[in-house]
Image (cartoon, helix red, strand yellow):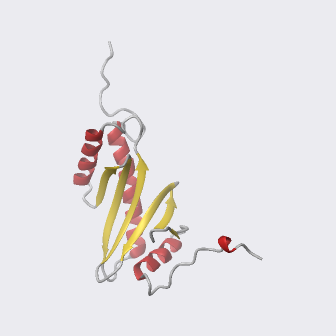
Amino acid sequence: MSDPAALPNFPPPADEHPLRGRVLDALLDLGLQPDIDADGDVVITVNDQNLFVRSHEGELQIMRIFGQWQLPPQIADDGRHLLQVCNELNLTLNCVKTGIGSGTLAVAYDHLMTPGADLNMTLQVGIQLVLSTVAFWHQRALGVDENGNPTTPQEDPS
């Protein structure tokens, strides 16, 4: 006899949460292993990063892809700098939002799901935008390029 806790987490009926059901199907088609958390968000792991997909059902369907990351300890206390980096990215990447709260960086991509929208492509683009934005944020916040080299000239200590 199997342990009931070991049974797979079956998605809800399609008519209960239609957008979330379509998101689950699309993520499976993309080769990901989605799950549903206690808040009703779809959870996926991409490149060892946990991301969430929240579906706002109703006449207007909105899909949000988001994640949260601990702030690097070397800059966690520099709130003004962290918010400046968020502001810079929010103005540069107008389809992604960044913010700081409770010692974490939050990054979100919202998409209005219009009839006929390609959900698979929207998910792929949204996931990559969130992950790329996290990388950009860390590079700018830490003052390094994509290889970890300083982007600003270092002061001579002598």
Relative to 156, residue 140 above or below? below
Residue at image position (53%, 78%) is 11
Relative to 118, residue 44 above or below? above
Considering the image in quadrants, where does the N terminus appear?
bottom right
Place residue 106 in its image quadrant.
bottom left
Relative to 138, residue 116 above or below? below
Place residue 139 in its image quadrant.
top left
How far across and how far down the image is residue 128, in percent?
40, 59
How far across and how far down the image is residue 16, in percent?
44, 84
Q: Residue furthest left?
A: 91
Q: Residue furthest top?
A: 158
Relative to 29, residue 78 above or below? above
Q: Is residue 39 left or right of residue 115?
A: right
How far across and how far down the image is residue 125, in percent?
38, 64
How far across and how far down the image is residue 142, in percent?
36, 37
Q: Is residue 155 left or right of residue 135?
A: left
Q: Residue furthest bottom?
A: 15
Q: In this rendered view, identify the residue nearer to me: 123 or 56.
A: 56
